[in-house]
């Protein structure tokens, strides 16, 4: 793997402004379009002061290699260099209709239907969607009536990008009574702990929310060198997931695609729930012997309440199993 010079730029983040990695290989600001490759996851309880860990701790925990990352630095009281992140002002919780336990029959269609064989998505009782900025404004009441029984909403990617539709989708789904969780698109050229802090700052720790999701896949549009060894990939994922679990009190869900799974995740993280992308075959064909909780079966779904295409998913279990899972997994 090529060796890169590690650069730490002495930038200062002003209050209420996000730390942007201007010298980072990804070089994405909060206004930039995400380079995600998926088909379409009350305020966060951020400490009142700056969130920070020592640079030495960051390097020891993440063991980051092959990336030039610019951080804002400030001297701590004891003289340590601190990686600073500005606190976010709390916003009031959004009135929610709350989920009443009703399961709506899926009435989705597909622009490119697939023959999955004997076991198809239609054999599953509970369907849902995942969305991001690409779906623009949606009618969540219509989506729910059309068969959206759960939703995973894109929140963040990397360490400085917030999906511009996250807040609107998060609040609208709640008002419509749709159980929903948020997902983070993981960057391999950013510190895992920094990404976790970014997600925590923007995703509410809110009663009724589903577990957070880490979206891990190879992003072929990325400018960074992604040839990380398997052990490094697993280590970075664990750092991120541990931080989210400590904050939200929920074990994160792992979303992945076949090529990334084959390279890194076979036989790993058996204690975590998996959400698998498999749009050309049943998951048993693409992920042999892997237990899964959610299956993303289409990236070309069609539904009332949204213009254009949308990702479609199913829950592995009947209606009673889904109600039990929501009751046990939600905040």
Image (cartoon, rainbow, N blue to C red):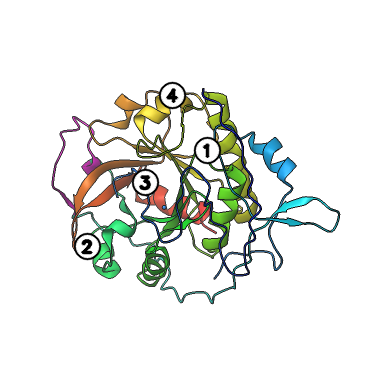
Q: Residue at x 41, y 73 (%)?
A: 97
Determine whether the residue tagged by mark 2 lies in a helix, strand or loop. loop
For the residue carrying disc 4, how many other residues have a C-alpha within 10 Å: few (<14), some (14-19), or many (20+)? few
Tell me if residue 81 is in the magenta stretch.
no
Q: Tell me the chief SS of the magenta region.
A: loop
Q: Is residue 275 left or right of residue 118?
A: right
For the residue carrying disc 2, how many other residues have a C-alpha within 10 Å: few (<14), some (14-19), or many (20+)? some
> Label 3 belongs to which residue?
36
Tell me if residue 110 is in the magenta stretch.
yes
Specify the quadrant that holds the C terminus: bottom right
> Rounded to the nearest whole Å, what is the CA distance between mark 3 and mark 2?
20 Å
> Label 4 belongs to which residue?
263
Asked whether the residues under the numbered discs 1 and 4 touch, taking CB atoms below 8 Å apart as contact, a structural biologist would say no
For marks 3 and 2 on the same chain, the one whose residue lies earlier in the sequence: 3
Q: Residue at x 42, y 54 (%)?
A: 323
> Label 1 belongs to which residue?
272
For marks 4 and 3 on the same chain, the one whose residue lies earlier in the sequence: 3
For marks 1 and 2 on the same chain, the one whose residue lies earlier in the sequence: 1
For marks 2 and 4 on the same chain, the one whose residue lies earlier in the sequence: 4
Q: Which of the 4 image quadrants contains residue 85?
A: bottom right
For the residue carrying disc 3, how many other residues have a C-alpha within 10 Å: few (<14), some (14-19), or many (20+)? some
Disc number lying in front (3 or 2): 3
């Amino acid at each position: 793997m090529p060796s890169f010079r590690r650069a730490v730029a002495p930038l200062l983040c002003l209050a209420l402004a996000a730390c942007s990695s201007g010298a980072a290989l990804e070089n994405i600001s909060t206004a930039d379009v995400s380079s995600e490759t998926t088909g379409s996851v009350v305020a966060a309880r951020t400490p009142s002061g700056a969130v920070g860990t020592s640079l030495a701790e960051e390097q020891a925990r993440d063991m980051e290699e092959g990336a030039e990352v610019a951080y804002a630095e400030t001297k701590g009281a004891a003289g340590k260099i601190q990686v600073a992140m500005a606190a976010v002002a709390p916003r009031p919780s959004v009135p929610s209709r709350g989920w009443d336990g009703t399961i709506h029959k899926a009435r989705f269609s597909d622009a490119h239907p697939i023959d999955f064989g004997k076991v198809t998505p239609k054999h599953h009782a509970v369907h849902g969607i995942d969305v991001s900025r690409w779906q623009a404004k949606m009618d969540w009441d219509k989506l729910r009536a059309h068969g959206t029984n759960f939703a995973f909403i894109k929140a963040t990617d990397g360490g400085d990008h917030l999906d511009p539709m996250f807040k609107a989708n998060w609040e609208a789904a709640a008002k419509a009574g749709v159980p929903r969780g948020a997902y983070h698109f993981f960057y391999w050229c950013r510190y895992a702990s920094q990404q976790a802090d970014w997600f925590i700052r923007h995703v509410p720790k809110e009663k009724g929310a589903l577990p957070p999701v880490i979206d891990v896949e190879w992003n072929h549009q990325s400018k960074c060198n992604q040839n990380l060894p398997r052990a490094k990939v697993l280590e970075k994922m664990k750092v991120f997931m541990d931080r989210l679990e400590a904050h939200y009190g929920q074990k994160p869900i792992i979303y992945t695609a076949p090529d990334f799974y084959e390279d890194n995740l076979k036989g790993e993280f058996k204690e975590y729930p998996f959400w698998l992308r498999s749009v050309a075959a049943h998951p048993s064909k693409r992920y042999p012997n892997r237990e899964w909780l959610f299956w993303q079966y289409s990236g070309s779904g069609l539904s009332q309440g949204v213009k254009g295409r949308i990702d479609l998913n199913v829950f592995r279990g009947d209606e009673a199993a889904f109600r039990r899972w929501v009751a046990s997994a939600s905040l």
